[in-house]
Image (tube, rainbow, N blue to C red):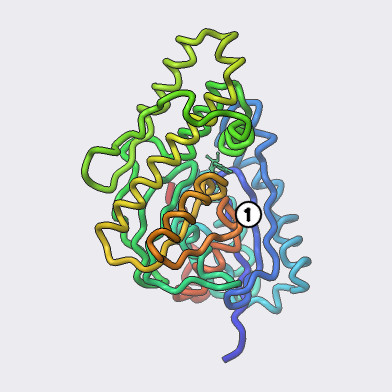
Amino acid sequence: MTERVVLAVETSCDDTCAAVVADGVIRSNVISSQAAAHARYGGVVPEVASRHHLELINPVVDAALGEAGATLEDVDAIAVTRGPGLIGALLVGVSSAKALAAARGLPMVGVDHLHGHVAANFLAPAPLEPPFLCLIASGGHTLLAGVRERTRFEVLGQTLDDAAGEALDKGARLLGLGYPGGPAIQRLAADGDPDAYPFPVAMAREPGLDFSFSGLKTALLYTVRELGEAEAEARRADLAASFQAAVVGQLVAKLGRALDDGDWHAVALGGGVAANALLRERVEALAAERGLRMKLVAPELCTDNAAMIGAAALELEPTAYPDYLDWDARA
Ligand code: KG4
Ligand code: ZN
């Protein structure tokens, strides 16, 4: 069989991404982060995101093709994230992908963003074969995915309120750090004491596999208030380290419980928070302790990117031209 080449587009949030993936191998993976544009608002502003995607999408697609040494002639299908995400942002990607595909009569593959985060684990080197348990933690989602096939996954537990990344972003804002908060907290935490403040590892005692992070955010807010501005500023590194430890502690506790409940022999991570060094270290230790196979995708494949969308698309049935022309996006 000849190699299948996919051009993938991802614009669900604040990164404009395009990639060329040939079978399970990344030929190019271009990410134009808008973080700087959103930083002064302390979070993603949907209208700002859509406008930036519109400006960036064509140059980013051109760069992905250029870096792969490919033209549209070499591409077998166009893949695009259809949701979930910011509707205006998604629509830029879906419309651009349709235009590219229609111009050449190419087939299209619509991809679920979360399936993309799982599918990052199917990429070379050392693709992970299902079955495996995958913790997905990002700015919009926190869930445990039971992956038994490459084409789909089962949600075993998920957050009841905020996502882990959202909690880190909000915590960072409380500490006067920039957006995105996760990397900022990780940097500051490196100089802090994770045991300085006993933030609750929420849901640790409740049964089940669901998560909750909103109480943790409130606990940080109260602690900062009690300390007062000057003291909170002086103890910022300890606060960041303790807060990060509580977020990661809950993720690892629930992952451990899901491993207890199921018959999993392999474990993986996905989503932006999976780029976190403490989480990676703790999950590696957990896997080693239990003798499980583990895949740790590179941090740049954990945060949003189009290579993961290409990886998911390679597992799915393409839709022939012109049947995708009425496709919409899912918010
Ligand atoms: O998957 P992603 O890029 O976008 C969504 O689908 O949401 O995840 C973004 C989230 C943000 O909340 C960001 O703060 C967090 O991932 N994040 C991190 C790190 N890098 C990104 N959190 C903790 N440590 C990191 N190194
Ligand atoms: Zn994501």
Q: Is residue 218 left or right of residue 50?
A: left
Q: Nearer the viewer, residue 1 or 128?
A: 128
Image position, residue 315 (x, y; %): 47, 74
Residue 327 visible in the snapshot: no
Q: Which residue is mark 1?
A: 300
Residue at 35% over, 45% down: 253
| 268 to 104, vertically: above or below | above
Q: Nearer the viewer, residue 45 or 29?
A: 29
Image position, residue 301 (x, y; %): 59, 57
| 2 to 186, vertically: above or below | below
Query: Which quadrant: the N terminus?
Result: bottom right
Image position, residue 289 (x, y; %): 41, 58
| 177 to 10, vertically: above or below | above
What residue occupies the far left of the structure in this picture? 207
What residue occupies the far front of the structure in this picture? 289
Residue at 33% over, 66% down: 264
Give, as a three-letter code, the residue at label 1: Glu
Q: Is residue 167 left or right of residue 203?
A: right
Image position, residue 272 (x, y; %): 54, 47
Q: Is residue 90 left or right of residue 31?
A: left
Q: Is residue 113 left or right of residue 1?
A: left
Q: Nearer the viewer, residue 243 or 1?
A: 243
Mark 1 crowd level (few <14, some 14–19, many ≥20, 10 Å Cα): some
Residue at 74% over, 70% down: 68
Residue 293 visible in the snapshot: yes
